[in-house]
Amino acid sequence: MNNRRNFLKNTALASAGAFLPLEILANLRTRVGANDKINVGVIGCKGQGWNNLMAFLKISEINCLALCDIDDAILNLRKADLAKSGISNPIMYKDYRKMLENKDIDFVIVATPDHWHCLQLTDALSAGKNVFCEKPVANSIAEARLMESAVKTSGKVVQVAQWQRSMQHFQDAVAFVQSGKLGDLLTTKTWMYRGNSVALPIVPNSSIPAGVDYKMWLGPAQMREFNKNRFHYEFRWFWDYAGGLMTDWGVHLIDIVLWATGVNAPKSVMATGSKIAFPDDARETPDYLNVIYDYGKFTMSWENIMGITGGLYGRQHGVAFIGKNGTLVVNRQGWEVIPEKVNGKELMEAVPLTKASDIGLDNHAKNYVSVLKTNDLTKLNCPIEAGVKVAINSHMGNVAYRVGEKIYYDESMGKFTSKNANKLIVPNYKNGWKLPV
């Protein structure tokens, strides 16, 4: 037990990337009775799906019963990895629908490309499974609404992987904003300056890698020849499957503004952007995007740019709440309050930088398992409603950019006043797949 405490104490705590080596994880897991085991199946095992699973496996009751991926190489790698952590012979699937037939699975992790989330979450609910779903919860506004309705009808435990909500310093920062100490909120800013980005070279289409079910990977997306630029991690830069940095990082950061202020949908959204960092690379989504949301009493801006790290307030990414008395700035590393000054006098007391002290993804997994045990859905740190709200707001920013208009939203109708914008609300499923009802 002392070894466990010392290891965790010395582990970097500020991000979800603080993972235990598999061999150490195996030694830390304690035996639990068969009746106490909670069986998980993972859909999408390469990147964030694996990260999510590692967070859950730090909880001894969690047993990985099944893995599902369209790539044999990934399945075989993860099977070997699980053996190192003391979990042998998980059941392997290449079609998630077959996995959902397994009645021994208690919950599934959905960590596939964004265009699959709606189908896989709703199918999992129909199969009686609880779900831990990656963000953005949906790849379109219509899908998000359908998913929220399906979750509410099912009564199942669904958590969206916006794990910043489970970090203590984000909770403290939100509580400070809600205290009113900043004074009247004038505007808010969210940003990501992705300095580690490099150009994605254009490459020709190629043959499908051995062991990959490419047709299943495409699913409801448009049929195209295989191109490695659209596969695995890089899928997020193409509209068929995702929404660029807006739905990759924007969902995490915009969520904090929506959470702290309680707003729902903006009155209007306008956007400008282009490919200026890497104008000739293979990406479709803009590497520079600036979006302004008008919520009536205050505005919010989102800005992303690739290739540089010098973000606002000296932070590569973050959220700023700008009030009459001062500004609160928060990101994954910590939060602080910078007072406003009038005639040299500070209008409020400064709050020095409070650094992050925990691991958000680990906390998020613990929160989810706790709710699985109690079935008290009010205790979820990120219920479906929160995931849907920020997904819709983020997609609105992309819609404004794609149609090149300032768009106005009628929340009561669930539509924009722009015909062009309304065309992007509902996705056009292909290859025989149908939008869930």
Image: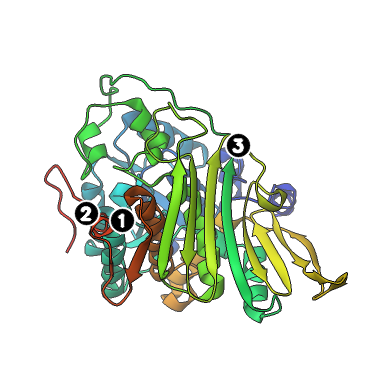
Numbered circle sitting on residue 101:
2
Q: Which residue is mark 3?
A: 195
Secondary structure of the residue carrying tag 2 is loop
Residue 224 location (% of width, % of height): 21, 31
Q: Is residue 117 above or below residue 215?
A: below
* Residue type, label 3: Gly
The residue lying toward the viewer, choosing from 8 and 33, is: 8
Q: Earlier in the sequence, mark 2 or mark 3?
A: 2
Taking the image as shown, residue 93 lies to the left or right of residue 247, namely left
The type of residue carrying mark 1 is Ser
Which image quadrant is residue 336 in? bottom right
Dot 1 falls on a residue whose secondary structure is loop
Q: Which percent across, then down, holds residue 222?
A: 20, 39
Q: Are marks 1 and 2 in contact (CB under 8 Å)?
A: no
Q: Which amino acid type is marked by label 2?
A: Glu
Quadrant containing the N terminus is bottom right
Residue 389 visible to the viewer: yes
Q: Nearer the viewer, mark 1 or mark 2?
A: 1
CA neighbours of label 2 inside 10 A, class few (<14), some (14 to 19), many (20+) = few
Query: Is 374 left or right of 179, judged from the image as shown?
Result: left
For label 3, the SS is loop
Whether residue 31 is visible, yes or no, is: no
Q: Nearer the viewer, mark 2 or mark 3?
A: 3
Give the residue at mark 1: 140
- Mark 1 closeness class: few <14, some 14–19, many ≥20 residues within 10 Å: many
Question: Which is more N-terminal, label 1 or label 3?
Answer: 1
Q: In the image, is 245 to the left or to the right of 13?
A: left
